[in-house]
Amino acid sequence: MFIKGAKEWIGPSARTFLLIKIFIEQKLLALGYDYFYGGIVSKCSIYDGYTKILGDHFKDIFVDFKYSGTDYILAPEYTFRVYEYLSRNDFPPDYKKVFYSQEMMRNESIADVKDGKTFSFWQIGYEIFGTDDSVLSVESIATLWHCLHTFPLDGLRLRISDKRILQALCKQYSISDMELHRILSLLESCNEDGNTFYNLYVQGGGSREFARMLAHLLCLADKNMFNSSVIQDMLKDDLALEAAKNLNTIYGELKSRCKDSDIVMVPAMPKTWNAYTTVVYDARVNDYDKAIAGGGNLFIDTTNPDYVHSGAGIGVTRIAEYLLATGKGVDASNASWMNTEI
């Protein structure tokens, strides 16, 4: 590999990547999304004022440089880039559904890159703007399913959660916001395994009662037994009950709109962005330890709290990596997905 953390392909491998990219782009156009292009160069200033929802360490992923005396960054994501453009142009009413297709660059840690993470990658994402949190969730998650289900992705499943579930559980056991960050980090490091989380958290001095409850919920999710009824039975906080009702509505609508979809509820999703406020979701496949897509709902505009948006990012590089590793690229005998009508 020429550069550790960046892919290079040619021939059938590169065509696999290219056709995945083109297929998803065409699918989003067919679903009524408008395309936004803004290039890889961005400005750090578009994130000013959002430190609280993005987290203090968000800017650590920036790759920055100076040109003609002005500071710039290489785009680490595009949600805020799209939002800044629409805000700068007074939110044109015609653009309620927007997608982008763009190379991204992030200052990932050396340890993560050694572990196989790419710091340069191609991502296609989309944003849907509106006023109803649940309706936007359904539309966004359904879009994700329509973009992915044609590919030969073994065990493709969409996981949905609501950040208010874990928030309510922390409130119930008097867990501080600072401690919540440690919990999320542990959940990520143990791949959300309930028993492993319990042992690590208790060994680190955490509450046994809290760890036991969260581990139980994680184990239920692992057996596909976690649902809104479990939330209502075990968490009595109004925040959790609101989340349960919301997830139940979303789940029912999705099963109706996305036939044959595998949609599962989980109590927490640590790898999602700090900026997400309520519903979060990702897409997983068998024998691949990373999400191939992920998204959620955000409240960005503090001047208009009723105006929300939902969106997701799809890892084109990761999907290509997975299909090539499993022998399902364009040169495979079963590569019928590339001939599928949009």
Image (spheres, rainbow, N blue to C red):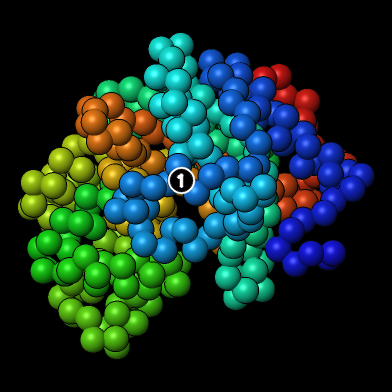
Q: Quadrant of residue 123?
A: top right
Q: Tell me residue 194's x, y (percent).
A: 34, 70
Using the image, determine if residue 214 lies above or below residue 168: below
Q: Is residue 255 above or below residue 223?
A: above
Q: Residue at x 7, y 52 (%)?
A: 236
Residue 319: percent from the left, percent from the top? 66, 47
- Identify the residue under disc 1: 45
Whether residue 268 sits left or right of residue 244 in the image: it is right
Residue 129, picture quadrant: top left
Q: Residue at x 72, y 24 (%)?
A: 340
Task: Tell me if I can see residue 237 in this picture.
Answer: yes
In the displayed orientation, state which residue is furthest to the right.
11
In the rendered image, residue 305, in percent from the top left (x then y), is placed at: 22, 31
Quarter of the N terminus within the rendering = bottom right
Q: Residues within 10 Å of mark 1 (few under 14, many from 20)?
A: few
Helix, strand or loop at label 1? It is: helix
